[in-house]
Amino acid sequence: MAKPVHVSYQLLLLIFILSVHLSSQLQFSQFQTLVKVQQLLNYPSLLSSLNNTTDFCNIEPTSSLTLVCYEDNLTQLHITGNNGVPPLPEYFSSDTFFATLGSLSSLKVLSLVSLGLWGQLPGSIVQLSSLEILNLSSNHFNGSIPGQVSSLRNLQTLILDHNNFIGRVPGWLGSLQVLSVLSLKNNSLSGFLPSSLSGLQSLRMLSLSANHLSGEIPGLHNLSNLQVLDLQDNYFGPHFPSLHKKLVTLVLRNNGFQFGIPAELSSYHELQKLDISLNGFVGPFPPSLISLPSITYLDIHGNKLTGLLSQNLSCNPELAYVDLSTNLLTGDLPSCLQLNTKGRLVLYSENCLSNEEQVQHPSNFCHNEALAVKVLPHKQKNKNPNAKSVLASSMVGGTVGGIAIVGVVLLVIRKVQNKNTVEKPSTRLILENASTVNTVKLLSDAKYISQTMKLGASLPAYRSFTLEELKEATDNFHTSSFVCESSHGQIYRGKLTDGTLVAIRSLKMTKRHSHLMHTHHIELISKLRHSHLVSALGHCFDFSMDDSTITTTYLIFEYASNRTLRSCMSGFPGQKLTWIQRISAAIGVVKGVQFLHTGIVPGIFSNNLKVTDVLLDQNLHVKINCYDLPLLAKTTRKGSAEISSPAIKASILARTQQDDRSDVYDIGVILLEIIVGRPIASQYDVVIAKDLLQVSITMDHAARKSVIDPAVMNECSEESLKTMMELCLRCLSNEPTDRPSVEDVLWNLQFAAQVQNSTQNNQESV
């Protein structure tokens, strides 16, 4: 038995010797490859450690050279030279270099940074089929990115920054399905981005800055893993890209983006860095961006953004850098940005803010600049993607849409005053002029936003109330303070310690109402402060003692009189509103609705507005009492005989995508009641009164006067009445797309008021 055992030991020893020899031979071939690489790189000092050993797997890693082995096979090769190293000598051949590297077939990571490599990236790179990370940044490669890279199916990171690559961003990148990092910044790439990028579901970082890329960004909203998007210093635009809300860093600096900032940007709760500076953005700046829960860096300078800032705006305490400079902002710098927070830098010069520690323009500068934003023809497109100048968009009815209309109104008024005559443009002309304004609804009226927010500036600052304050104001919610109850909750009348009368709405919350949703909605409600709204003054949360969830939300509003617009039209003859007072009331209603749509982001639409929701104080000043508040259920009141909008109410999450035409229909019903002077309490009433208007409008002035409220029959002018009738019928169009925009409604109401005043002035001067 001894002999077999002896033979077994001999075989084992032989196998061991052979395995060591083969392993050493395999490692030595890789060492020879590294020596060849050293030679091709012109013997840089950073590879000098290779001269002292053949055991490269045990070389101590440095910042210049790192080798990683697995089972004696080289799996990672990191070589980093000095920044700005010149190109290698003319005898260098990238083909030879990568053919040499091709023998390292087990490489998973190849990083060759700042080594002076030049020439075209050869297709022989496909031999490195195991590559997962490829970094060739800060070299001198030129030509296009070779299609052979698409065969590297395991590639997770591709970094080709700071080279001279030309041509387009390859469409085949979409085939690299495990790609998580794609960085091609600081090259000379041009053309449009391929739509295939939208299919890279694993992508976490996309950096294409400092190229010559242009055109629209393909939809990236499905890339739920994308955290970093850097597109600065290109010619992208004009529309803001469609993105996923989980972004952490978004840099669009110095491009050709125009139009407005989308409302949904205010819901990017993971966003830490936002840089949209040096573009052509116009329209309102959403102040909520400074209070995003994760934001630390915000730069919007060098645009034409408008809006009224106020001191009571809140901001993220972690916000370290803010640059609002060189825009058209008005009002006061928020107090939270004025605090001497350690390490925070705030820049806001060259606006029209009241804070003058940094240079500001006079207030009329921002107004005039907003008016002067060039409106290009609707079909005209920017033909030069390589021009980095800040241009107004082709639809900057989207710039400040309503402003253009107001400018036209003012010109008409001046002509009326100068000539003492009025010539009304045709309805068709008004529609044509307004149509370009409505192409970009989100940006429709920054001027109105600024003006109307000023009208709410006299209100006390919005704040958080304590439950004890509310109990004291209502005598512990005594029945004597109870006003009414609706499907949305109970309403109480209260009196604060300073004597202010308030209305307190109590809303019961359910488990489905998350804390984040509360925060978002309260932030929106805090902005509902306007001269023509019953404005929000504050809120209060009542928490459960068991799990600290919010059980009841109290919303505190101004207390308004119970005198409705309907009661002012259906009262005794001597107490009814005059014709011009009715038009003025309608203008107040429309301005309030306009603020709900465009004065806050996201806008509030489908407000189910009724004439009984329009209140008037002793000075006949209009305030809308009921509108579509966040946190309220999207249901109508039970048993209500009032008319609801014919448009289907969309969910709260879709508010910003809704058109304003359902609210315009409700405005039409109010106009109908203003004209005929009797309650319109059902859809049947609408149909009958609408038919009367349609018949009479085609006849003479006497026929038209026969269908209106007798109380104002003899005072309304022909042009004013006809304008009101035409506008009312357009608002009540069955097809929402045939209804005018809110801005168009306001235009016509202001015109009706002007011609009525002119007629009265002429009569008084005779």
Image (cartoon, helix red, strand yellow):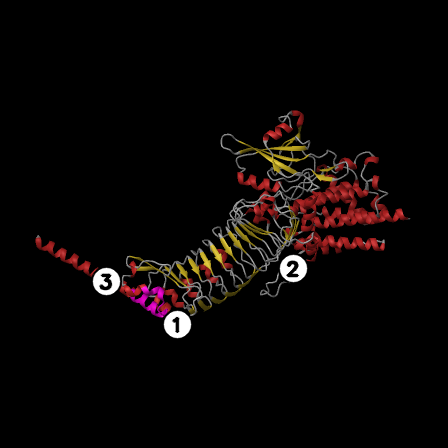
The crowd level at tag 2 (other Cα within 10 Å; few <14, some 14-19, many 20+) is: many
Closest to the camera, between mark 3 and mark 1, is 1
Please state which amino acid type lies under the numbered disc 1.
Answer: Ser
Placement of 684 over or under 279, stated as above or below: above
Does the rendering let one see residue 697? Answer: no
Residue 222, position as x, y percentages in the image: 50, 52
Q: Give the range drawn in magenta.
A: 31-48
Closest to the camera, between mark 2 and mark 1, is 1
Q: Which of 513 and 273 is in front in this view?
A: 273
Residue 374, position as x, y percentages in the image: 68, 59
Q: Is mark 3 on a helix, strand or loop?
A: helix
Q: How far apart are marks 2 and 1 (CA)?
A: 49 Å
Please state which amino acid type lies under the numbered disc 3.
Answer: Leu
Residue 248: mark:
none
Placement of 600 over or under 253, stated as above or below: above
Task: Pick whichever of labels 3 and 2 is earlier in the sequence.
Answer: 3
Residue in view at x 87 percent, y 49 percent: 762
Residue indicated by mark 1: 93
Does the rendering let one see residue 98? Answer: yes
Tell me the quarter of the picture where residue 82 sits: bottom left
Task: Pick whichever of labels 2 and 1 is earlier in the sequence.
Answer: 1
Placement of 134 over or under 724, stated as above or below: below
Please state which amino acid type lies under the numbered disc 2.
Answer: Ser
Q: Distance between the residues labelled 3 and 2?
A: 70 Å
Residue indicated by mark 3: 22
Residue indicated by mark 2: 394
Residue 495, position as x, y percentages in the image: 67, 30
Placement of 90 over or under 432, stated as above or below: below
Q: Locate residue 12 relative to residue 451 in the image: left or right.
A: left
